[in-house]
Amino acid sequence: MKVVILAGGFGTRISEESYLKPKPMIEIGERPILWHIMKEYSRYGFNEFVICLGYKQHVVKEFFADYFLHTSDITFDLATNEMTVHNNVAEPWKVTLVDTGLNTMTGGRVKRIRPYVGEETFMLTYGDGVANVDIAALLQYHQSHGKIATITTVNVGQRFGIIDVNDSGKIEAFREKNEADGSLINGGYMVMNPEVFDYIEGDSTVLEKEPLENLAKDGQLMAYHHTGFWHCMDTQRDKKRLEEMWNSGNAPWKTWE
């Protein structure tokens, strides 16, 4: 089963770095967050990836073109113009990089990769969020209900402290936020049957609008609720927090050896 990753957006809310590279290529622990996401899937045996590219796609293509250079010890013999790779430790990945257009919306990007996934069920996620989702359990859940699509829902807690107010307006307590204070959102880590392509009109279609809304209306959209770690890298503050977790040796999304 292939894993489709949306990696073509402009990343305007983290423009401090995205003016140089696409957001999925911004690094956590000296590796692009895209690499972290792929490692998560690979840990469950999913090693075929289709990556939807757009903004500064050459950065992603060059990264994978030179990937073994990044991960191996190499000797260059300049006199004979030969290169020897001593310990190729690259992952067993097959990566298809697809130009899905500069201004194409998320749904349109998914529509454009149809030739690369064919008539098979596929995984789909965003290229800017990491989690410790049990992907095997997610797939089992998708297969059990028989609907077209499954999204993983996560609870996003409030960023600030909470004031508890009763019905009369009396403040009863000041307290720290907790997960129950947030709302459920689509955290990515989706599973789609090929019928989903029929719900996507074209390049201007936003996946999170008509396609998912119409799937829900038709009773074809299910939610797999994830209660563990999930974090997107939307801003420089998010990147800093993920970097601190990684450097401390306590990165909850690192479930691989």
Image (cartoon, grey):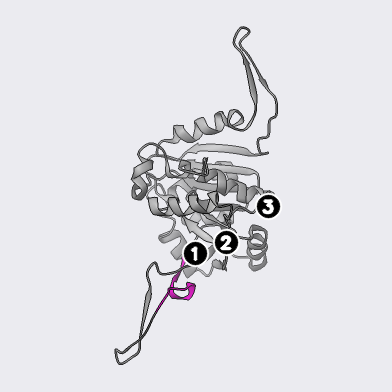
Numbered disc in front, either 3 or 2: 3
For this rendering, which residue is in front, 215 or 180? 180
Q: Residue at x 43, y 44 (%)?
A: 23
What residue is shown with label 2?
Answer: 148
Q: Which residue is mark 1?
A: 215
* Cα–Cα gap, marks 1 and 2: 8 Å
In primary-sequence order, the first of circles 3 and 1 is 3
Residues drawn in magenta: 175-186
Query: Type of residue at label 2?
Result: Ile
Q: Secondary structure at mark 1?
A: helix
Q: Is residue 101 above or below residue 231?
A: above
Dot 1: within a 10 Å radius of its alpha carbon, few (fewer than 14), some, or many (20 or more) residues?
A: some
Q: Residues within 10 Å of mark 2 (few under 14, many from 20)?
A: many
User: Can residue 194 be seen by looking at this rendering?
Assistant: yes
Q: In the rendered image of this protein, does residue 150 appear above or below residue 39? A: below
* 1 and 2 marks in contact (CB < 8 Å): yes
Q: Secondary structure at mark 2?
A: loop
Q: Which residue is the site of mark 3? A: 44
Kind of residue at badge 1: Leu
> x%, y% of residue 179?
48, 72
Q: Judge depth for marks 3 and 1 and give the one in front.
A: 3
Residue found farthest to the bottom: 168
